Every structure is written in C-alpha cells, then in structure tokens.
Image: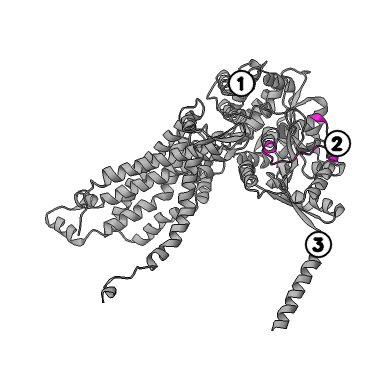
Amino acid sequence: MVALNKKPFRWHIPILLLPAFLIYSTIMVLPLFGTLQLSFFNLENGKVIFVGLQNFYYVLTDEFFSVRFWNALGNNAYFFMIHMLVQNPLGVLIAAMLSSKKIRAVAFYRTAIFIPAILSFVIVGFVWKLILSPLWGIAPDLLDLIGLKSLFTAWLGKEAYALTTISLVSVWQYLGIPMMLIYAALLSIPEEVIEAAECDGITGSSLFFKIKLPLILPSIGIISILTFVGNFNAFDLIYSMQGALAGPDFSTDILGTLLYRTFFGFQLQLGDHYIGSALASVMFFIILVVVTAYLFIVQNRLRRYQF
Amino acid sequence: MKKFLLTTVAAATLATFATSAFAEDVTITIESWRAEDLSIWQDQIIPVFEKTNPGIKVKFTPTKSTEYNASLNARLDSGTAGDMITCRPFDNALAQYNKGQLASLNGLDGLKNFDDVAKSAWTTDDGKNIFCVPMASVIHGFIYNKDAFKELGIEVPNTREEFFAALDKIKADGSYTPLAMGTNDQWEAATMGYYNIAPNYHKGEEGRLALLAGDAKLTDAEWTAPFAELTKWKAYLGDNFEAQTYGDSQNLFTLGRAAIYPAGSWEISGFNKNADFEMGAFKPPVAKAGDECYISDHTDIALGMNPASKNPEAVKTFLNWVGSADFATLYANASPGFFSLSNHKVTMEDALAADFVSWRSDCKSSIRSSAQILTRGTPNLDTAIWGASVSALKGNKTPEVLGAELQKGLDSWFKPKM
C-alpha cells in the first residue's frame, strides 16, 4: 500500500520539454557562448591566440574604430528615444481610443494599424524609400498639392534628418504592437472598477489618467523593455533602406549595421570575426544590463492590482 | 516477391554502373558578383565552351555584388563554395590565396597571353605566385546624351574649362539635369567621381606609386584637388541628389532627363538596352589642351580556382580557355564595357565600348589609387574615400580637411618606408 501512495515519476514532463530544450540550446545558447568565447581570441601571425580583453579594449578605445562604435551607440540611443517618445505614447493613445465605446469600426482600425507590423522589413524599407524619393516619390507631389513643396528635402540623404526619418518609418511599422498589447490590457480592466470610479465622479480624461493608466503601467513597462531589446538589435530596416554603410556619412549607423560590417566585412573591407564577436558581446551586455536593471529595480516596484 | 526485389536490386545496380560508365560529365560552378551577366554566361559564353569541351558542364552562380565578399568568404570557410572563384583585384583575392582558398596557377598555359601589368592585381607581393586568370578591366569616363548636346549646341569637352562651360550651358537651359549622380549609395561618388577624375591630377601610375612608396601624401595638392573639383560638381547635380540612389541616376540618364553621366564602362550594356537616344563618351577632361591625359583602366575581374574543387582538371581546362583569344573576343563583345586584359587583338563591335577602349592608345592607363596594398588595414582607404567623396560632393568639408583625415587614417597602419 505504501508504494501506491508514492507518485510515480512523471516522465512525460522531461520528455515533452526535451525537444524545445535541445533546439533552444543548439541554436541559441551554444552560439551565444561561442560568440563570447571567440571574442577573447584574435589572429596573430596566422595563429589564433588568446588575447584576453584586448578586443574589447580595441572596440571601446581604438582611435578609429571606437569613433564608429560610440557613433553607433549614440545613434542607437536616439533611435530608441524616438520609439519611446512617438511609438509607445501613440500606441497607448490609439489603444485608448479604440477601447472607447464611442468609436465605430474598431476592428477595421485595429487591423489597419497592425498590418505594417506583419509586413516584411524589405517591403517597408523599399516602399518608404520610393515614397520619399526626390525623383519618383509621391511625397514631393503630395506636399505640392497642399502647397508645402518647399518643405520637401532629401530626408534620407541628409545627415541631419536621415536617422529621424528612418526611426519614424520604424515607428510606423511597429506601432501596431504596443497598440495591441495596451488594447488587450485596457480590455482586461474589470467593468466594476470603471463603474466605481464613475460613481465617484471621475470621468473622461481623468478616468484614463487616474484609473486606467496606473492599471496598465506594468504592460507599458514590458513594452518599453521589448522596444529597447528590439531597437538595440535592429539592423534590417536600416540595411534595406540605407545599405550596410548606413549613410549618409554613418549618420544612420546603429550597432547592428556596425556589427554586420565588422563581422562579415563590406566591399573591399574584409570581415573580422574576432572583433565582430567582441562587438556582439558588447551589444549583448548592454541589453543584458539594462533589462536586468529594469526587471529588478523598476518592474518590482510597480504596483500590481489583483482583481 | 523476393524475386521481384532481387531483380530490382540487380537492375538498380546495373543502372548505377551504366551511368558511371557513360556519364563522364563533370559539373563545375563559377562564383561571381556579376549577377547582371547571368544571361551572357548562360546563353553566350558557356555553350561555346561546352561545345568544344564535351563532358564538362559549367554553371554560373552569381551573388549580389555588395554581398559577394561576405557570403563567398563564409562559403569558402565552410567548404561549400564553387569550383571557380571570380577574383576581386589585389588584397581581397590575395587574402584568399594566403588562406589557401585560391589555388596557385603557376604554369597554366593560358596565362602566357597576359602581360605583367594585367597579372599584377592577382600576383603575390614577391611576384612569384599567380592565382587568377585576368578577365577584364573597366575604364572610367563620362557618357553623354548626344541628342542633348546637339540640341544645346555643345561640343564634347576636352579641358576642365570646357567641361564646366558645358555644364553651365546645360544648367542655364534647364531642360536637362547636367550631371546624373547621387550620393545615397556612397560608392558611386568615389568610383565614378573621384577615381574617374583623379588620375589626371596625380598623373596616374606615377602618383599612385609615389603614394605607395611614401613619397606622396594624400594631403598633397594633387590628391586633394579632385575633391575640390567634386565640390564644384555640386551645383550641377539634380535636386536633392543626397537621396538619389545609383539606380535613380542610371534611370535619370537613360530616360533622357540628364545630359552627362559620370560612368564606368560597365554601364554600357545596360545603357544600350535602356536608352533610346544616341550616346557618346568622353574621357576625364584635362587641365589645359594638349596635356597628357590619364585614365582609370582598372583591372577589375579575374577567375581563380578553389583548391577544394573536386574536378581540378576540368577547372584548369576552363581557365586555359579563359586565357584564349576565343574567350577574349566572346567576353569583350558579350559584355561591352569589360575590356579584355589579354594580348589578343579584340575588335569591339559596340561603338560606345570602342570609344572607351580607344582612350587606351591616347592616354596613360592607371588603376584605382587605393586598390593595391592601401585597403589592407583598418580603416580601409577605399571605404574612407567613399565617405570623403560624398562629403566633397555635398560640400560638407574642405578638400584639405578631407585629405588630412584620409592621411591620418592611412598613417595609423600604413608604414611605407620601413
């Protein structure tokens, strides 16, 4: 009888976990450690030798390379800032509007705004490049129609505007994601809470700012961190719009494009796997530090409401 | 059932023997960055070779130009690259040779038909080993719209003064964009701008070798002057040229909306197909009438062998054929604008291409100044010149500042007098 009380080992759990574990470790974890390992080595006289932190020192301080690195990091921070200032507030605003009961055709707007997020970045990059082209684009013509042709300039070709332009294209593309997440969070707020607030005389915009916003703050936090990780890993849109050199004059160069040029080489410049790995590791650490700091410091302090 | 199985196995075995006995056909593949040439190779070049060399099948498998080096190196490292490798000139191919990814071709018969200058781009520094069979060079110059020139009554310019006078006239008229060039893709500013006009300033090979020997610096007047000329071009480029891509410039010219296109001869076949007006070409203008002229006649493309190839004999047969007069004529005429480097006499059928190649006898040829040795280190001089040419075209920096920046980058790793 005693034996019957003891639960048998549930073999199906490890067995069902095994495929995911194997795939995840072979294509994610192992390469990550491989990259970290590679970043401590370099070629010297045709032999691969252990160089300690020298590659990292080169990335951060070399007279020429570090200029590119800090430039890319600064651009990346700016890229992230535009997303935080435009994409996420706009996402919250649109979600708030969609969750209001006064708006018709919610499903249509929701779908229309979300569609760019499922388009390929190649299509998005190419379409926007055509729209903004000074020769064949429709942007100059459209501005002409409302008499503002003088405002048009080569937005993708001038150092002062290129990064902002690309950031806004990226915002346009990914706006649907924060919108959807916030929309879901807003819908999950129970009716009773809203009704209680209305009974207390809180309506309209103060209902949103005093009741709904605090309730969706954890979602906004998660969206911010997703935006951060996405932006610091970004590469595709810039590569498809401005090429690997991230012109003009490296003004749209972010860590992803710099990594591509360093690791794989570009045109006559040969790729350097060792410095490239060091750069990839630096990117990994930047993301790791910020995400950890956020999770431990900010996310824990956000109040959670149980319904 | 058992019997049936046995028969099948026997038949299959027989079939295997049969195929191995009759199918001596080996297939060899060519890696290339000339995706544009796919039809030329498939329809014109390869069939001729396969006809005279039965048993060898050739496949042309190109990659996009800007991704060629990165993806080819990755495939060479992993051992999945093709049998024949199209070689970039100088350091890129040299690095592959030094890594054992290109085979030495010393003693290959076909190489006898090339002189040392043609082979220099694919020879080791000590001159002992050669690793690619030279295929073609490209020449820089300007292609112009003959109809537009006739309409505006402009003569083909020979000197810089005439060149800018012509540009002024086109601009004043207003119906054509004087120069079809943008800076969006960066390389065209350097390749078709700087490398195009610079040889007339630094006296071609003379200046280039002085730079390699350390006797000249990029801050010297003859090296910064091309940037000054590029800055003068700015006034003649299209509106918002900053966002004009390479493809935009090509279309602008072939649609007849621009008068002059700073060009490389590789444009010829595409332009012939797309433009429905008559085109002519003129070489980079010189300072004064009667000055010696220099052109950029850049050894650009060659073919080497992957040492990991399983069919080295077939590859060698093909490479020998690439060195033959047959191939030289076939290739030069199939892709006008890629001029043969061999000693064979090649008659050009295309008028525009014949224009370009005729400059070889009037002017001294030179290769791009940064191609040899100077792209070996980081920062890479070639890429740096791209950025500098864009800055010059936009007028962001003075030629002196650009020269100083380039020289500083070069000094950080290039020590000529050692």
Rounded to the nearest whole Å, what is the CA distance between mark 3 and mark 2?
Answer: 33 Å
Q: Residue furthest bottom?
A: B1
Is the C-beta separation of discs 3 and 2 under 8 Å? no
Circle 3 chain: B
Which numbered disc flags the more N-terminal residue, 1 or 2? Answer: 2
Q: Amino acid at mark 2?
A: Asn
What is the x, y in percent for residue B360?
A: 80, 29
Circle 1 chain: B
* Residue drawn at (83%, 47%) of the image: B317
Q: Amino acid at mark 3?
A: Ala
On the image, numbered disc 2 is attached to which residue? B113
Question: Which one is nearer the viewer's eye here, B364 or B228?
Answer: B364
What is the x, y in percent for residue A25?
A: 46, 54
Which of the two marks, 3 or 2, is nearer to us in this view?
Answer: 3
* Residue drawn at (44%, 31%) of the image: A70
Residue B254 as seen in the image, left or right of residue A108: right
The relative height of residue B16 versus residue A215 in the rendered view (above or below) is below
Disc 3, SS: loop
Tag on residue B228?
1
Is the C-beta separation of discs 1 and 3 under 8 Å? no
Quadrant for the N terminus of chain B, please: bottom right
What is the x, y in percent for residue B347?
A: 86, 38
On the image, numbered disc 3 is attached to which residue? B23
The relative height of residue B27 versus residue B329 in the rendered view (above or below) is below
Rounded to the nearest whole Å, what is the CA distance between mark 1 and mark 3?
Answer: 62 Å
